[in-house]
Amino acid sequence: MQPGKLHLRRFGAKRQEDEAARAVHARRARCNRSLAYPTRRIALKAVWSVATRFLKLRARAVHARRARCNRSLAYPTRRIALKAVWSVATRNDMMFLSHMEQDLHSLKDDMVAFIEGHGLRRFNAYVSDEVANVPWSADEDHPDAWKDFVELAKASGVSFVTMNFVHLDREDVDLLLNRLTEIDYMNEEDVEEARWLNNFVGKVGFVQLGFPCQGVVFTYEVSTEWYEAYQRLETAADDYDGILIDDSDLEEE
């Protein structure tokens, strides 16, 4: 074989090897790119996930700060609102209790119904101190003690209970005012207190229950503050009338 042909053959073989190497390199490059794309996508997804999580956490932090701020602003308002509601409810309860304490009309009706429910009759009478009596020891913590008193009357075997109540009339207040104003040494505060009684005209201020047993009358009494004031002022007016009567007797002698 001639040297020129051998050289051409070797050159051709090397060229084929180079082309084969380039083809292999190209296939490897394509393969690497195909492998790199998912990796890049995965990396981008990871970065995006981290960024999204960071944004969510930041948004939650901002929301939490706003919520704390709103609560800090709302707490005084809520406290004020609760205090206002409590104040109104307490005031209504106090007004209701005050009304019940200053007017015993509903209590009287409850007593009548309770007495009749136990099969007892009512005898309208007032048991004075001139009659031998034993008063029931009242307990402020047990306002329904009158029910125990009626049940005791039923258990003692009596067929009736005495009942007396006092409601304030306009004429009673006017008469008391006239008597007090005629007293020279009467305190002005007592006169004003007598005028204050006009607020309770028509209300029931005293209720007495009683039942006889073995020669003694057992009694239960309940009264209001204004009735006790009325009794005190009436006693003062009676004492002054007694002084006038004594003076007139001495002048006659």
Image (cartoon, grey):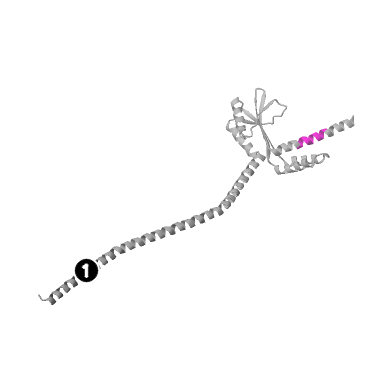
Viewer-nearest residue: 75 or 206: 75
Q: Which residue is drawn at 71% across and 36% down?
A: 228
The quadrant in which the C terminus is found is top right
Asked whether the viewer can see residue 120, the reply is no
Q: How many labels does the image show?
A: 1
Q: Quadrant of residue 242?
A: top right
Q: Where is residue 40 in the image (x, y as percent from the top left)?
A: 33, 63
Q: In which quarter of the image is residue 251?
A: top right
133 is within the stretch colored magenta: no
Which amino acid does the dot numbered 1 rest on? Answer: Ala
Q: Residue furthest left?
A: 1
Q: Name the residue under label 1.
A: 21
Q: What stretch is highlighted in magenta?
A: 233-242
Q: Quadrant of residue 183?
A: top right
Does residue 80 appear to the left or right of 65 in the view shown?
Answer: right
Element marked by disc 1: helix
Q: Position of residue 207 (x, y in %)?
A: 67, 34
Q: Position of residue 51 (x, y in %)?
A: 41, 60
Asked whether the viewer can see residue 144, the reply is yes
Question: Does residue 223 lie above or below 89 as drawn?
Answer: above
Q: Residue at x 15, y 72 (%)?
A: 10
Please name the predominant secondary structure of the magenta segment in the image. Answer: helix
Viewer-nearest residue: 160 or 129: 129
Question: Does residue 110 lie above or below 84 as drawn?
Answer: above
